[in-house]
Image (tube, coloured by chain):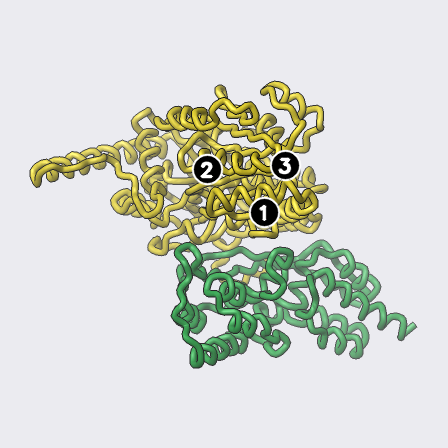
Amino acid sequence: MNETRSIWDYEDIVKRGLLEDLELLAEHITGRVLHINATYSGGGVAEILSSMIPLLKGLGIETEWNIIRGDDEFFSTTKTFHNVLHGRVNGAAEVLVAHEPVSVLDGLKSEIGELTQRKEMFETYLHWNKVNSEEMDLDSDFVFIHDPQPAALIDVKQRGKWIWRCHIDVSNPDPLVWKFLSESISKYDASIFSTPMFARPDLGIREFLVPPSIDPLSDKNIELSQGDIGRVLDKYGICMDKPIITQVSRFDRLKDLPGVIDAYKLVKKRIDCQLILAGGVASDDPEGMGVYQEVMAKADGEEDIHVLLGSPPFSDIEINAFQRASTVIMQKSLKEGFGLVVSEGLWKGKPVIGGATGGIPLQIVNDVTGYLAHSVDGAAFKIANLLKNPELARRLGEAGKEHVRHNFLITRHLKDYLLIMLSLENPSGTIRL
Amino acid sequence: MTDFTFYRARYQFELTGKKARDLPELLAAIKTIDESSIFNHVYHALLDSHFLPIGYPNDFAYWVIDALHEPVLAERLANLDLREFHDTEALREEIVRIIEDYMAIYDVSCRADVGQEFYFIRCISVTFPTRHVVTNMNEVLETIKEIDLDSIFYYFIASRLLDGEHYQELSRWIQRNDSHELIEKLDNLYPYGFANMDALRDEIVRIIEGYFWENI
């Protein structure tokens, strides 16, 4: 990726002082910056880096972005790691192998089988990290390693400051997998977490706090004309003649799509409205199609419930249009990572109702930038309240947009990364350049 | 007159690994936590004032009402008179005194729900020269009118507590080049009594302009 972008493209969006500071801070960064993750496209990390890397280059910082390669077994392993690192819902952990021993002997056999499987996974993981470390030029002044997949590249560190950027919740991980990974992670100079709740106190290295961000100039967030929005809705047979409630999310049980439908049905008894549920099925999620079919069954053919399965995935412009066409946006998750889709909705000036989980409460300040809902009834009451009070919806939407402008845009994210690089070069807590 | 370069500070947040679920844990951590954490939790709301409820202008007060539902203590912590503190140690002692006094009278068995813990976060302050360089008081005035609010925060609030040797460097420059009277007014300015940083900037501009009128 050789593209560069000027921070001054954001001049009409954020304060001039912030953009000036990005230039001033960048002048003090010397050397090469390298970012490594698992993919150039798909998922939040790739989205952020797609915006971040051209901006770093535009600031005159020599920056490269590489991805690691591996075979199916490696990516299956890292997907399993991902699931068991933040796979706990209501205290129950997913396990690598389901086992219900019927006797002591069977139990022991099962545990031995599980340990053997884990050992093979760990070997696969280390093998591909070693392969990548031999192929990549890691000689950089600052190396940002994103998420667990490439974390063991640190084992060949020669020089520079290495930072492990964790985008997932590792506060309640599978102990064995965490013990394995933390042997590598603890060798880093610092780590970065999205919220304090996602972090671990046992790493023994500096832990910075950097929430993720959205890019207001990306296709997913850029302003659209009414014509553009109308064309997308026409394509999916949706008429904008009544208020639209929308949830954009994967067909995943943790997004509580049945709960959204129940809330909509309660509201529909009192106020004429329609519901859009737009999302895809992750290729590595065997449950996804099942969830989609359950949602279709629950929608029961009602003409004002639009269940849209993006296959191939919806374009970013289409998602943007669904959100901009909405009167109320939902993210009624039962368990969530940071839930950056909330910021996407808020940035469009829409009131957002979200579940009080993961990073959602950081984005939705209850009754200020949106509403937190703890139940179907609570969600229904708040949807109805917003549909009946356009002025309230406008006020929450405006406050939400300002909240995102201050806290969740790519320009703030960029500033944080520059400050972290400077902090690592100057260990004092008060740095004067 | 010699040139004066305006500086600005930006802050990066770092986890301390300490958290509290109840008042005894909060108190114990406040007693030992580093100064920049105290500064962060008391002062950062001045920059993020749009979204914290006006009644609870610092993180300690807000957590005490939001997670522990202790309105009396929250109001006492909210009412900290920040004018009295020229360093964070004095501020820490006052917060400790307020909490200990409260704990001596009231039952404090309430614990925050899981996920509602108070996380202690320190801030790393990175201070750097801006492109605003002035040579006279007119330029100082014009710069203060247009400069980013973080510079106002730095000169009138943060440098006093975190950046001791640079505290009053703007005042000292003005003093070398202009009026003691103006310095006195700026130094006596109570920066915490304003709804937001824009209002503080307006007051600084008003003081300097008033001085100009009196000295034409």
Q: CA distance from mark 3 to mark 1?
A: 13 Å
State the image coordinates of residue B79 (x, y, percent, origin top left): 59, 73
Chain coloured yellow in this rendering: A
Q: Residue at x 67, y 47 (%)?
A: A392
In the visual, does A276 lie left or right of A38? Answer: right
Q: Residue at x 47, y 75 (%)?
A: B99
Classify mark 1: residues with Cα within 10 Å, few (<14), some (14-19) or many (20+): many
Looking at this view, is A314 or A143 the one in front?
A314
Q: Nearer the viewer, mark 3 or mark 2?
A: 2
Cβ atoms at labels 3 and 2 below 8 Å apart: no
Chain coloured green in this rendering: B
For mark 3, name the chain. Answer: A
Q: Residue at x 36, y 56 (%)?
A: A201
Q: For the residue labelled by badge 3, is the local secondary structure a helix, a strand or a loop?
A: loop
Circle 3 residue: A327
Q: Nearer the viewer, mark 2 or mark 1?
A: 2
Residue A421: tell me if it is visible. Answer: no
Q: Earlier in the sequence, mark 3 or mark 1?
A: 3
Q: For the residue labelled by badge 2, is the local secondary structure a helix, a strand or a loop?
A: helix
Kind of residue at badge 2: Gly
Circle 2 residue: A259
Looking at this view, is A375 or A207 the one in front?
A375
Task: Identify the image quadrant of residue A130.
Answer: top left
Residue most toward the right?
Answer: B216
Name the mark on residue A370. 1
